[in-house]
Image: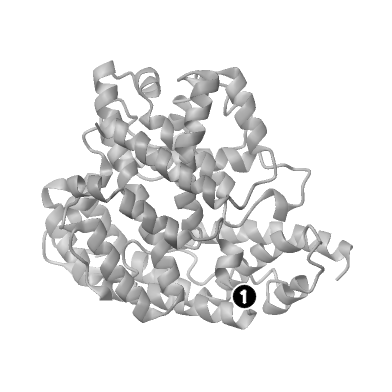
């Protein structure tokens, strides 16, 4: 395969990714169950991966292209299992008598747990009773991923992770935050989920999370001006935590829109998305900033402080959940028994008592980019502090900060972070959250 072929393959990968992303979004909704997003892209195969791997290691396209091909080949090989998982979560319905006579999918039951506060405990009971088939489907996906890695003769960690020692970093974060976790720990799943929603910080938020309402929060800045933003489907506005997730998706779309157009696709866009997730975490961090809460949500200084405390708890919960997912990803790649054992151990750390191992995969299910999601949270507090020191508390409105952020987002993405930097970022995030939690 000569250089011209690699350039052509880069263009082909860019087109395949468009189809793949569209398919993923539909599949999460339980649609596109009969659609094969790879049928028009026959180069996404084991042979294609091996031909790129045979290129000289000094070839600048080799490493980034291998990362993309590995992720795409993995999903192609896993297509039947991914469809079965989507069906189990979003399509198959369960006839219920309590707390209401209705037939709902697992995703719909879980949505009731989150939204129907008066009956959330009973909805959670029904979800727990019916979640095992989806958990088994999720575990089959990870079994297949392990097989794909073996067939391709690759170490998934070497291709996917942003730093060495990610499991140690995740366990260190759980240890560092263990004392504070005891204050928020709720042994019942519905109570834990309620604590992650941040319901007390309800004042000032729009009634819906969509592109228009999110853009309105940045009406006093040129940060988003002229960008073709595509954050994808945004979460329903169930609670303040919904807006943190929506802001994170907006930040990721900001990075996507500014990706360098003069670079090959596989260099300008990384399949595990550390850069886009880091910008997403930074945007979400704004919701913990009193000046943003006062100016954009219109709440009083006292309300802003209360909101900050509640939303810091939301971020605290999310940080621990992401650390758990990093550990579950490694366990899932090590086999079903280790996955189940790790799930039991780690849900005990989150909730105070373990969930049954047969539910491994139904909740807190790991994703292939969980290490990047975790790392992005660690880095957000430091990035926000640096922006504040350089451009004041309302840095998101400062023209120089806007120019800096847009410049940073337009650089080819960094895919790795030194372990020493992550250790320092862990400590900084923990101290920042502690100061907010009071």
The image position of residue 236, as x and y in percent, is 35, 44
Marker count (numbered): 1
Residue 28 in view: no
The image position of residue 250, as x and y in percent, is 50, 38
Q: Is residue 426 above or below residue 351?
A: above
In the image, 362 versus 12, the foreground residue is 362
In the image, 382 versus 393, the foreground residue is 382
Position of the N terminus, as image quadrant, is bottom right
In the image, 172 versus 80, the foreground residue is 172
Residue found at x 36% / y 31%: 288
Does residue 150 appear to the left or right of 64 in the view shown?
Answer: left
Residue 342 in view: yes
Neighbour tally class for label 1: few under 14, some 14-19, many 20 plus, Cα within 10 Å: few
The image position of residue 316, as x and y in percent, is 32, 44
The image position of residue 220, as x and y in percent, is 50, 18
Look at the numbered disc 1 and give the secondary structure of its residue.
Answer: loop
Residue found at x 43% / y 37%: 284
Position of the C terminus, as image quadrant, is top left
Does residue 254 appear to the left or right of 263 in the view shown?
Answer: left
Reading the image, the residue beneath label 1 is 154
Color encoding of the figure? one colour
Residue 202, by quadrant, is top left
Does residue 333 appear to the left or right of 352 in the view shown?
Answer: right
Residue 149, by quadrant, is bottom right
């Amino acid at each position: 395969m000569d250089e011209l072929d690699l350039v052509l393959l880069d263009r082909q990968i860019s087109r395949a990714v468009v189809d793949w992303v569209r398919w993923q979004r539909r599949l999460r909704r339980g649609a596109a169950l009969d659609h094969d997003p790879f049928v028009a892209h026959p180069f996404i195969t084991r042979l294609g991966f091996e031909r790129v791997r045979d290129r000289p290691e000094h070839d600048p396209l080799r490493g980034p292209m291998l990362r993309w091909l590995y992720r795409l080949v993995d999903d192609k090989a896993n297509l039947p299992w991914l469809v079965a998982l989507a069906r189990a979560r979003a399509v198959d319905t369960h006839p219920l008598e309590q707390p209401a006579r209705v037939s709902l999918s697992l995703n719909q039951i879980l949505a009731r747990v989150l939204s129907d506060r008066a009956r959330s405990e009973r909805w959670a009971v029904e979800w727990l009773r019916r979640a095992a088939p989806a958990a088994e489907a999720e575990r089959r996906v990870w079994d297949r991923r392990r097989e794909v890695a073996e067939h391709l003769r690759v170490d998934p960690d070497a291709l996917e992770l942003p730093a060495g020692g990610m499991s140690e970093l995740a366990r260190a974060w759980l240890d560092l935050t263990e004392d504070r976790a005891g204050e928020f720990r709720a042994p019942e799943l519905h109570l834990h989920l309620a604590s992650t929603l941040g319901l007390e910080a309800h004042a000032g938020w729009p009634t819906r999370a969509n592109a228009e309402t999110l853009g309105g929060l940045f009406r006093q800045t040129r940060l988003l001006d002229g960008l073709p933003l595509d954050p994808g489907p945004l979460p329903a506005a169930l609670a303040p935590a919904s807006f943190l997730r929506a802001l994170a998706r907006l930040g990721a779309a900001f990075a996507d829109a500014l990706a360098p157009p003069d670079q090959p696709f596989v260099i300008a866009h990384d399949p595990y998305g550390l850069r886009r997730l880091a910008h997403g975490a930074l945007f979400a961090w704004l919701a913990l900033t009193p000046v943003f809460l006062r100016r954009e949500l219109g709440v009083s200084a006292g309300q802003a402080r209360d909101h900050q405390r509640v939303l810091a708890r939301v971020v605290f919960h999310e940080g621990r959940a992401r650390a758990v997912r990093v550990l579950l990803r490694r366990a899932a790649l090590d086999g079903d028994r280790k996955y189940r054992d790790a799930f039991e151990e780690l849900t005990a750390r989150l909730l105070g008592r373990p969930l049954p191992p047969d539910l491994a995969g139904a909740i807190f299910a790991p994703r292939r980019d969980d290490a990047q999601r975790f790392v992005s949270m660690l880095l957000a507090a430091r990035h926000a502090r640096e922006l504040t020191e350089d451009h004041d508390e309302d840095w998101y409105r400062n023209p120089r900060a806007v120019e800096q952020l847009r410049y940073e987002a337009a650089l080819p993405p960094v895919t790795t972070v030194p372990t020493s930097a992550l250790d320092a970022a862990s400590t900084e995030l923990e101290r920042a959250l502690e100061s907010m939690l009071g």
